[in-house]
Image (spheres, grey):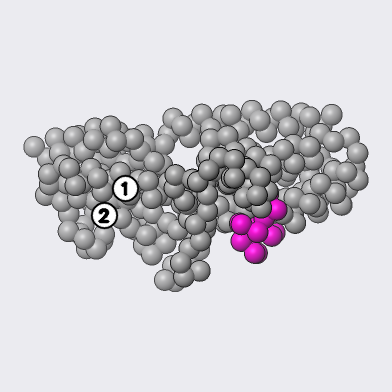
Amino acid sequence: MTGALVLIAAVVVTAAVAAAMRWKNGRFTSVVDDDREVVTAEQIGAPLGERATMVQFSSAFCSPCRATRVLLADIADKVDGVVTVEIDAEEHLELVRELDIMRTPTVLVLDAAGVVTTRASGLPRRDQVLAALDAAVGSTR
Amino acid sequence: MSTPTQVDPRGLRVVAGITSAVLAVVLVVPSEPVRTALLTVQVVVFAIAVVAGLQKSPYAIFFARVVRPRIGRPAELEDSRPPRFAQAVGLAFATVALVLLLAGATTAALVATAFALVAALLNASVGFCLGCELYLVLRRLRPVNA
C-alpha cells in the first residue's frame, strides 16, 4: 500500500518537474539593472562581438550543449556583429561561481561593452535567442 | 576515454523506460523477497552500465538486438558520458534503497527507490537527464584545482 502511494507521488513529481523544465529551458531572464555584471574578453579568452556576444557555458556531462552550440553558431554566422563563445565550465570554475552558473548549457548575452544583459539555462529556441540579442543590441544604442 | 563513445539517444530512452518499469514494480510488489531480488537486479544493471559502459547494460543489449533492428538507424548519436554519469547517480540511489531494504527500513527504501524512479521517468518520458544536471552543481562544490 505504501509502495503504491510512493509510486503515485513519484509520477506526480515527475510530471511537475517535466512541466517546470519545459517552462524554464531557454527562457531568458533579464538581469536587474543595478545587479549587472561585466564580462571581459580576458575572462572568456576571446574577443567580444562588435554588437553582442553570446557566451555558452558547457560541460562534458551535458547532452543539450551540442544542440545549443550548433544553434548559437548558426545565429552568430547570420547576424552581423554577433559572436558566440563556448566555455568549458569545469575549466573556469571561478567564473562559474562568480556568475552563479548552476546548469549547462547556460547562455549569457553580453552587449557590446560586455555587460550581461540576459541569461538562460537549458536548450533555447531560435526565436528566444534572437529576441535576447535584439534586447542586448538595443540596450547599447 | 580519449574519443568519447557515441550512443543512440533512443536507446537511452528505452533503457530509462525499462528501468522505470522495474523500479515501479519494486515499489508495488507485495512480496518482500521479490522486491529485494528485483532491486538487486537493478543495482547490478546500473553497476554494469557505470563500470563496463552503457552499451554493456543488459537493457541496452535488449535495445540493440530487439528494438533497433525494427526502427532503423538513428538520426544522430550522443556523447555517452552524460548518461553514464546519470547511471552512476541511479546506482547510488538504488544501492541506498537496497541497503535500507535489507536493514528492514522498508519505507525509507521505497522513498530512495522513488528518487531513482523520478530520474528514470523524466529521462524516458521527456528525455531530460536529471543526473547530468547534477554534475556541474556537484563539481562547483569542490575546490578549484585545474
Report the span colored magenta: B47-59
Q: Residues within 10 Å of mark 2 (few under 14, many from 20)?
A: many
Q: Residues within 10 Å of mark 1 (few under 14, many from 20)?
A: few
Closest to the observer: B12 or B99? B12
User: Label 1, on which residue?
Assistant: A70
User: Label 2, on which residue?
Assistant: A85
Task: Quadrant for the N terminus of chain A, please.
Answer: top right
Closest to the observer: A79 or B74? B74
Asked whether the beta carbons under mark 2 and mark 1 sit within 8 Å of each other, the answer is no
Residue A135 figure quarter: top left
Q: Secondary structure at mark 2?
A: strand
Q: Earlier in the sequence, mark 2 or mark 1?
A: 1
Residue B54: say if magenta. Answer: yes
For image coordinates 46% across by 67% down, the residue present is B3
State which chain disc 1 sits on.
A
Residue A44: say if magenta. Answer: no
Where in the figure is residue A43, as x and y percent of width and height?
26, 61
Q: Is residue A30 visible?
A: no
Per the model, the C-alpha gap separating discs 2 and 1 is: 12 Å
For image coordinates 69% across by 60% down, the residue present is B48
Where in the figure is residue A44, as x and y percent of width and height?
26, 59
Q: Amino acid at mark 1?
A: Val
Q: Amino acid at mark 2?
A: Val
State which chain disc 2 sits on.
A
Question: Magenta-highlighted stretch: main secondary structure?
Answer: helix
Q: Is residue A65 left or right of residue A8?
A: left
For image coordinates 65% across by 49% down, the residue present is B65
Query: Mark 2 vs mark 1: same chain?
Result: yes
Where in the figure is residue B9, as x and y percent of width and height?
52, 46
